[in-house]
Image (cartoon, rainbow, N blue to C red):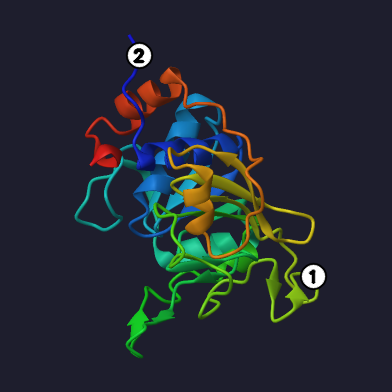
């Protein structure tokens, strides 16, 4: 019997999980259910020695939770505190996950403030873990949305630098790590090209290319982007039965 079609959140989690490797140390943010699901799926599927630092509290949680705080039982292998987390990340971790209020063509991320058409400013979560974007070896970006308000030609405020900021490359800015290596939206998987510009490399959503292009804040070019390999029944079954039996990614 064919497994029911994956939800947007499930597709993003599965695509992110494919990027994770064994023996890596990955860090997720507070309230990052999708990255945590991706990490737990990778541990169950192909990366059993992946270490997950979840929200500054839980190390290798065994239960998917909606957000990371003392009120939820994530059944972690260990419990840490933020001082432990910052000490570990300063030594160097392999990947940090970020979403964002805005993400631009150069993979700069805005977590701070967005200028509204009314002239007011919408505040975001701020600087809780933005330093990790410059100490982790690489950054994975994701967003449940694919619209021109989120995917911008230029962000209103740079919280975490991507591949070019004010005309300067990461190397010129003195940033030694790789920076963002992937962006997964609800429709498209992007990777940076040799100039650090995010380019679509695969479609995984249901929208047609003209709709995807119109919903992106920068020029995508002609519709020659291939469709990604479909989500396999085995991946989705493992995600639903082992990682997310409560169906949080389907809500």
Which residue lies under the disc numbered 2? 2
Q: Are marks 1 and 2 in contact (CB under 8 Å)?
A: no
Could you tell whether 11 is left or right of 22 in the image?
left
Count of all numbered marks drawn on residues in the image: 2
Q: Residue at x 34, y 18 (%)?
A: 3
Q: From the top left corner, tell me how far across and down residue 93 is, in percent.
A: 60, 54
The quarter of the picture where the C terminus appears is top left
Give how far apart the Cα atoms at labels 1 and 2 are. 48 Å
Q: Quadrant of residue 165?
A: bottom right
User: For the view shown, which residue lies furthest in the top direction?
Assistant: 1
Q: Residues within 10 Å of mark 1 (few under 14, many from 20)?
A: few
Q: Local crowd at mark 2 within 10 Å, few (<14), some, or many (≥20)?
A: few
Q: Secondary structure at mark 2?
A: loop
| Sequence order check, earlier mark of 1 and 2 | 2
Q: Is residue 115 left or right of residue 90?
A: left
Question: Which structural element holds mark 1?
Answer: loop
* Residue at the (36%, 31%) spot, across then down: 6
Using the image, determine if residue 36 lies above or below residue 137: above
Q: From the viewer's perspective, is residue 146 above or below residue 176?
A: above
Of 43 and 220, nearer the camera is 220
Residue lying furthest left: 71
Is 57 left or right of 87, judged from the image as shown? Answer: left
In the displayed structure image, the side of residue 42 where residue 163 appears, left or right: right
Residue that carries the numbered disc 1 in the rendered image = 171
Res 170 quadrant in image: bottom right
């Amino acid at each position: 019997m064919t497994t029911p079609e994956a939800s947007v959140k499930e597709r993003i989690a599965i695509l992110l999980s494919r990027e994770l490797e064994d023996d890596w140390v990955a860090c997720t943010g507070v309230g990052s259910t999708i990255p945590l699901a991706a990490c737990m799926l990778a541990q169950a599927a192909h990366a059993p020695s992946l270490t997950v630092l979840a929200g500054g509290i839980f190390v290798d949680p065994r239960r998917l939770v909606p957000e990371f705080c003392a009120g939820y039982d994530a059944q972690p292998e260990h419990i840490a505190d933020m001082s432990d987390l910052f000490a570990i990340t300063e030594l160097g971790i392999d990947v940090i996950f970020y979403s964002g209020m805005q993400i631009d063509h150069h993979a700069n991320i805005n977590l701070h403030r967005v200028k509204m058409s009314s002239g007011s400013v919408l505040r975001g979560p701020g600087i809780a873990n933005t330093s990790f974007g410059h100490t982790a070896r690489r950054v994975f970006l994701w967003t449940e949305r694919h619209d021109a308000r989120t995917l911008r030609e230029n962000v209103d405020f740079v919280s975490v630098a991507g591949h070019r900021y004010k005309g300067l490359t990461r190397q010129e800015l003195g940033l030694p790590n790789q920076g963002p290596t992937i962006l997964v939206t609800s429709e498209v998987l992007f990777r940076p090209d040799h100039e650090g510009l995010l380019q679509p490399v695969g479609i995984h959503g249901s929208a047609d290319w003209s709709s995807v292009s119109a919903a992106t804040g920068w020029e995508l070019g002609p519709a020659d982007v291939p469709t990604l390999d479909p989500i396999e029944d085995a991946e989705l079954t493992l995600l639903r039965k082992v990682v997310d039996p409560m169906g949080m990614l389907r809500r």
